[in-house]
Image (cartoon, rainbow, N blue to C red):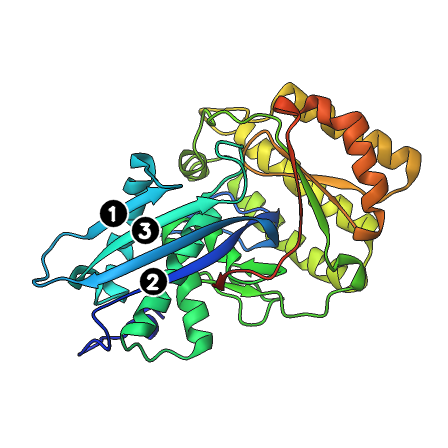
Amino acid sequence: MESTYISEITSYKTKEGSVSCESPSNIALIKYWGKKPVQIPENASLSFTLSNCKTITSISFKKREISNKHFGVRFLFEGKPKPSFETKIQVFLERALPHFSFLKDFDFEINSSNTFPHSSGIASSASGMSALAKCFVDIENQLGGKLTPLKQIEKASYLARLGSGSACRSLEGPIAVWGKHNKIEGSSNQFAVKFNLPVHSVFRNYQDTVLLIDKGEKQVSSTVGHNLMLDHPFAKNRFIQANKNLAKLSEVLQSGNLENFIKIVESEALTLHAMMMTSYPYFILMKPNTLEVINRIWEFRKSTNIPVCFTLDAGANVHVLYPEKDKKLVLNFIKDKLVDKCQNKQYICDNTGNGALII
């Protein structure tokens, strides 16, 4: 599989150039929690690709007079150095080096920014790494790469995974699947694919309002959390459950059964956090206001029959999911009953989108 993405360039078409890409974050509905080396998921996952929460990355490149063993990379976030992300980029480049023969022949300046507020509690690794990977695949193409457009998308997703597992799902949308699954044709552990079955109209432009419950740094990183699944007593059954839930959700996305959609999505969110609370060492990423918001969503849904539900990432924030036709009523509910539980009353309105784009 890996050899498919190696394209040795014997002579470069250009000595300098630039590329810009915007790539969104995504929110998993079927969660993956637990992986094998390197960045291979223990179970398949399915996500909504978002539209407004995205990273915009520009890379300028220039040929070196003499190539050497070190990467020539300068990274700026919103115009300023960000050392904490430079380490992640170095790891990404080391992993990507076998697939990009040009990396040590050029100097690169990377400029990146997010459309969502800095330190908002929205994970930027998915949008950031997917934008980075797509930029480098485009640079390879400019230099003389010969991959087909389809293979370029696959390679970008493959490489994004090496930087951040969930990043591979941001390349395409509005629904993406990562991980080999017998119900999803073409699915792979190596890269994500677009959900290729018919999707019911109720899920078109599905809404996701992100409630920023807590914007602080997580006490346990996702990397550490994934590693705790290696000897987790419930891990094996969890991986089986996730794959079964993905099959069920695949049917729901085609039928438009919102009652079952809610059951699966909310159960997946709570199961993710149950795995954290039953690992050793155990930890809790939800905050008191996370639980208060969940209970208020349940009360609102019961009293109005509006099919609004929640999912959670590996943190305290709550993603409120609902059909576009109910947008006005749900936003009024959020403003009246949920915003007071958000840090600094901050929330972000988003919806499903189509993935990364060269701009």
Question: Looking at the image, which is closer to me, 74 or 212?
Answer: 74
Residue 193 at x, y = what percent? 54, 65
* Residue 205 found in image quarter: bottom right
Residue 8 appears anywhere in the view: yes
The amino acid pointed to by label 1 is: Arg
Mark 1 falls on what kind of element? strand
Could you classify mark 1 by the number of other residues whose Cα lies within 10 Å: few (under 14), some (14-19), or many (20 or more)? Answer: few
Residue 165 at x, y = what percent? 44, 50
Mark 2 falls on what kind of element? helix
Residue 158 appears anywhere in the view: no
Left or right placement of residue 208 versus residue 120 in this view: right
The amino acid pointed to by label 3 is: Ile
322 vs 66: above or below: above
Q: Which residue is mark 1?
A: 74
Q: How many marks?
A: 3
State which tag comes first along the sequence, 2 or 3.
Answer: 3
User: Can you tell which of label 1 and label 2 is closer to the viewer?
Assistant: 1
Check contact, mark 1 vs mark 2: CB within 8 A. Answer: no
Check contact, mark 3 vs mark 1: CB within 8 A. Answer: yes
The amino acid pointed to by label 2 is: Phe
Residue 327 at x, y = what percent? 81, 45
Residue 123 at x, y = what percent? 50, 40
Left or right placement of residue 259 versus residue 51 in this view: right
Q: Which residue is mark 3?
A: 110
Could you classify mark 3 by the number of other residues whose Cα lies within 10 Å: few (under 14), some (14-19), or many (20 or more)? Answer: many
Q: Which residue is mark 2?
A: 136
